Image (spheres, rainbow, N blue to C red):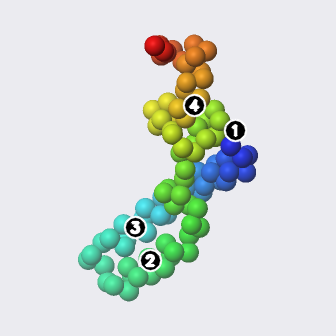
C-alpha cells in the first residue's frame, strides 16, 4: 500500500481541479483570444497564476484504486499491474484468464 498521505494529497488535488476547472478554462480562453487587448489578456494571465497550483489537472497522479501505487497503472482498469495480477489469480476480474507456461 502507498502512504495514506500521498493518496489523500492526490484526492485533494482531484477536488481542487474539479472546483476550479470552469474558472481555469474561462481564463485560458481569454488568454488565447488574440482579438482582446494585450492588457486584458495579461490580467487574465495574472489571475490564472493566482489560482492554487494543485487545481491544475496536470498535477493529478494516476494511482491504483486498490493499492494506491503510482506507477505501472492501467487506465482502463484503474489499477496497477501488481493488483491486476493478484486479483486475476484469485479469479475476481471477469473475463480475465491468467495463464502461466
Look at the numbered discs 1 and 3 and tell me whether their residues touch, using CB distance below 8 Å.
no
Residue that extends furthest to the bottom in the rendered view of this protein? 39
| Closer mark to the observer between disc 2 and disc 1 | 1
Q: In which quarter of the image is residue 86?
A: top right
| Closer mark to the observer between disc 1 and disc 3 | 1
| Relative to 63, residue 35 above or below | below
Look at the numbered discs 2 and 4 and tell me whether their residues touch, using CB distance below 8 Å.
no
**Real-space Cα separation, disc 2 to disc 4, in angstroms:** 42 Å
Look at the numbered discs 2 and 1 and tell me whether their residues touch, using CB distance below 8 Å.
no
Mark positioned earlier in the residue sequence (1 or 4):
1
Residue 87 x %, y %? 59, 21
Give the residue at mark 4.
Answer: 82
Look at the numbered discs 3 and 4 and tell me whether their residues touch, using CB distance below 8 Å.
no
Residue that extends furthest to the left in the rendered view of this protein? 35
Give the residue at mark 1.
Answer: 1
**Real-space Cα separation, disc 3 to disc 2, in angstroms:** 8 Å
In percent of the image, x 44 and y 76: which residue is there?
44
Instruction: Count up the numbered dots.
Output: 4
Local SS, label 1 = loop
| Relative to 87, residue 26 above or below | below
In percent of the image, x 51 and y 39: which residue is there?
73
**Real-space Cα separation, disc 2 to disc 1, in angstroms:** 39 Å
Local SS, label 3 = helix
In percent of the image, x 33 and y 84: which residue is there?
38
In percent of the image, x 70 and y 38: which residue is there?
1
**Real-space Cα separation, disc 1 to disc 4, in angstroms:** 11 Å
Residue 66 x %, y %? 63, 32
Give the residue at mark 2.
Answer: 45
Please name whichever residue, 62 or 81, is drawn nearer the observer in this view of the structure: 81
Amino acid at each position: 500500500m502507498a502512504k495514506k498521505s500521498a493518496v489523500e494529497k492526490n484526492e485533494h488535488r482531484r477536488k481542487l481541479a474539479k472546483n476550479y476547472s470552469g474558472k481555469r478554462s474561462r481564463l485560458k480562453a481569454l488568454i488565447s483570444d488574440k482579438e482582446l487587448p494585450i492588457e486584458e489578456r495579461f490580467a487574465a494571465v495574472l489571475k490564472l497564476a493566482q489560482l492554487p497550483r494543485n487545481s491544475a489537472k496536470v498535477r493529478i497522479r494516476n494511482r491504483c484504486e486498490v493499492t494506491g501505487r503510482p506507477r505501472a497503472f492501467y487506465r482502463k482498469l484503474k489499477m496497477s499491474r501488481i493488483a491486476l495480477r493478484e486479483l486475476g489469480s484469485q479469479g475476481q476480474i471477469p473475463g480475465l484468464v491468467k495463464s502461466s507456461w
